[in-house]
Amino acid sequence: MTGKSHRPAPERALPRAIKAVEVTAFGVVQGVGFRPFVYRLAERFGYRGWVRNIGRGVEIHLESEGPADFGRFLTALESEKPPLARLEKTSVRQARVLGCRRFEIRKTTGGPSFVFISPDIATCANCRREIKSPSERRFRYPFTNCTDCGPRYTIVRSLPYDRDNTTMARFVMCADCRREYGDPRDRRYHAQPIACPVCGPSLTLKPARAGKPSPGGLEEAVELIRRGKIVAVKGLGGFHLVCDPRNPAAVRKLRLLKERKTKPLALMARDLGVIREFAVIGHAERRELLSPNRPIVLLQKKRDLPGVAPHLDEIGFMLPYTPLHHLLLERLGLIAATSSNRKDAPIAKDEGEGLSPLCDFVLTHNRPIETRADDSVLRVVDGRPLFLRRARGYVPQPQRVPRELEAGTQILALGGELKDTVSVYKNGYVVTSQFLGDLDEYRNFRYFEETVAHLERLFDVTPAIVVSDLHPGFRTTRYARASGLRHITVQHHYAHVLAVLLEHGVPAGRDVLGVTFDGYGYGDDGGAWGGEFLLANYLDFTRIARFKPVPLPGGDAAAREPGRMALAFLRDAFGGHIPELEPFRAMPRKKIRLILEMMDKGINSPPTSSCGRLFDAVSFLAGAAPPSVEFEAEAPMRLEAVSRRRARAGYPFELDLSGSPWEISFAPAFREIVSEVRGGARAARVGPRFHLALADAVTAVAVKARDAYGIEIVALVGGVFLNRTLVSLARTSLQEKGFTVLMPEKYSPNDESISLGQVAHALARLSL
């Protein structure tokens, strides 16, 4: 994804017979080898002048001996740019001839700053060759990088992107590195993280509790992992907890230390050949695995590794993305590499952040991490990426807003409460942070505050408006109220829809049908929404349909115990008589009676239209979900894992058009599910039919919305649309009916996209 963009058009055409021009390039043009590229390009065309970084991008002055057509230079500027560069806008104007004698690279100038920076990028092929070649001075050096690869976002403290503004400032370059850094023909020209064994960062191995360095370094760490030890390894955005996934005892130990019972662990493999031993790699999956962003990619299991991803049919793999990882995997071939954090806390970036109870040894280094960032996670659905988590490798890529929404006001959007991100808006662009986690955990809220401060400092943002979720009890809402800024609130599901509209550049004033399925969102009526159909544009929305609400017995407890929601939906389908079914044998009779009594009396049982809780109920009744789940969406994920087979027909449902909003009831589906389960049907039969029923319901409402409102675009958003089976079924069904279907491709459909949608609505309020 990096380095590809539309070709920006110059702001105005130039006459052919001129001798000098000034070009300003705006985008990801600092720290990516753009200035030496311009230097070589100018030499090739025989131009004199200079290039330099400025606060708003890169400035180029070109002079020729006689009148010249600079068009070929401008074309090459876009078509041949460095792999990490991204041009958003290029302006060009006629300039005064200054009599330059040569072309040179000048020092950065000051002034107002608004420039983008590349994400952290995986080790390039040239650097990989160096660390493997004994004749190179960086042979087996774990911090090798150049202008085409290496750390960016996680080490930068402020812009412009110069070494003094990064965590590499403490390392004084040796003569050899200084020579490379100063040579425009060298691929390390002005590579700010440049380093070598003489002058750069170094590794240290320590016992987790003793803290004193151990001999052996990297080689000893490899042997420790082979012997079943847990080693915390410092990477780009934080520490990984690493163990041998082929060793069941080591996996059990890692789960015990991390207090993670069933949530899947990620794997890092030396190469595609190792991955193919355990998983199926399609063409699109291969593309994502090998991309310079290096995400974790969920792949269909071919061979199981006990304890790594229990009860699921997918396993997450990534390839090495730093020289240190390449050196580790060279010997080990395969490691489990999961974030070094306790449950719900942020990834650790420093040794003093509670690492010692989580591991046996720490393999660390002395290059500080400025900004922590987890690994990104995605799956491929119908050949397209679908992000479960967007972080390292993709942040802080900017998002341009439609021209009619552009405003001069700077905006800070705070997202929701769970799976949070924050976004800042300035000069026509939104920058969205990395995944921050759940802010109901105080350490994650501190991470949230760190990130807000970092983005405002990095992009020189002084917000005049702060945007938050509508929920009055969220920490982000309270933070916004306390800021003293003009405060705008945006309903949760509406923000989901707007994020997709902004990403795809849907013009202002165009209405779409936003289908928003998730676990919970605070409705504009104060209710617990989660199965919503919104007629929406940037300025406003109408809730035209919803899932029929059922009680949420026990509030948050219902999200942790799927059996509670099964009772709620059975009560809706059968009235007071709850059928006897095998899955309920795991629940005490007394508890069942108390839950039913809670609903009958309306005690702590608010009504909810949640699609996530609907999934929980079906997964439990089908025997896929346990009585109590460890993590959100565990029950739906287990049901999805057994739903590969295509059903011939979905379960029945009722669409009631008599009221406002319209209501979809799945009571008929539950009556049929009960009949099938009593007859011996298992999740492998129930799951596919249920997924198809949901897709059918989406299409049915879309058709009615087109008849009533002329809708032609449907946006599928919310965490439930991380489900590959549902996405594929719903998208296909809608397209067969002639709808244009929009889904996030650069962002996640879950709550990470909320802050982006919040910016969109605030801009509409300002601009329209």
Image (spheres, rainbow, N blue to C red):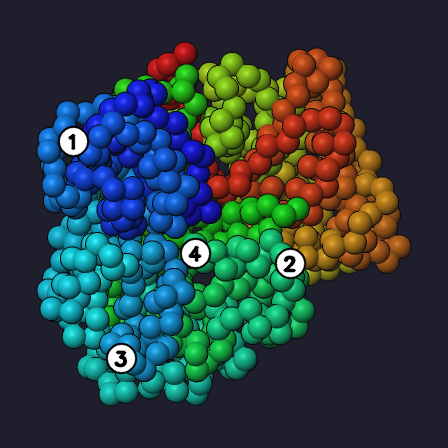
State if disc 3 and disc 2 touch (CB < 8 Å).
Answer: no
State whether residue 77 appears in this view.
yes
Q: Which residue is mark 3?
A: 205
Report which residue position mark 1 lands on. 112
- Quadrant the C terminus occupies: top left
The structure residue drawn at horizontal position 29% and vertical position 63%, both measured from the top left corner, is 145
Give the camera-side residue of 660 and 96.
96
Q: Amino acid type of disc 3?
A: Leu
The tag earlier along the polypeptide, 4 or 1, is: 1
Q: Position of residue 697 (x, y in %)?
A: 74, 32
Residue found at the very far right of the displayed protein:
679
Verify CB contact (< 8 Å) between mark 3 and mark 1: no
Q: Is residue 498 above or below residue 434?
A: above
Confirm or deny contact between disc 4 and disc 1 (CB under 8 A). Answer: no
Query: Which residue is drawn at the image coordinates 51% and 49% (left, top)?
Result: 388
Task: Tell me which label, 2 or 3, sits earlier in the chain.
Answer: 3
Tell me the number on the disc at residue 292: 4
Q: Few, some or many C-alpha atoms within 10 Å of disc 2 (few <14, some 14-19, many ≥20)?
A: few
Mark 2 → mark 4, Cα distance in angstroms: 18 Å
Secondary structure, mark 4, is loop
x and y percentages locating residue 312 in the rendered image: 64, 62
**Figure check: 352 above or below 297:** below
Q: Which badge, 2 or 4, is on the more N-terminal residue?
A: 2
What SS does tag 1 mark?
loop
Residue 340, visible in the rendered structure: no
- Who is closer to the viewer here, 688 or 184? 184
Q: Which residue does the numbered mark 2 point to in the structure image?
A: 282
Going by the image, does 82 lie left or right of 636?
Answer: left
Kind of residue at badge 2: Gly
Report how far apart the C-alphas of labels 4 and 3 lie in the structure: 28 Å
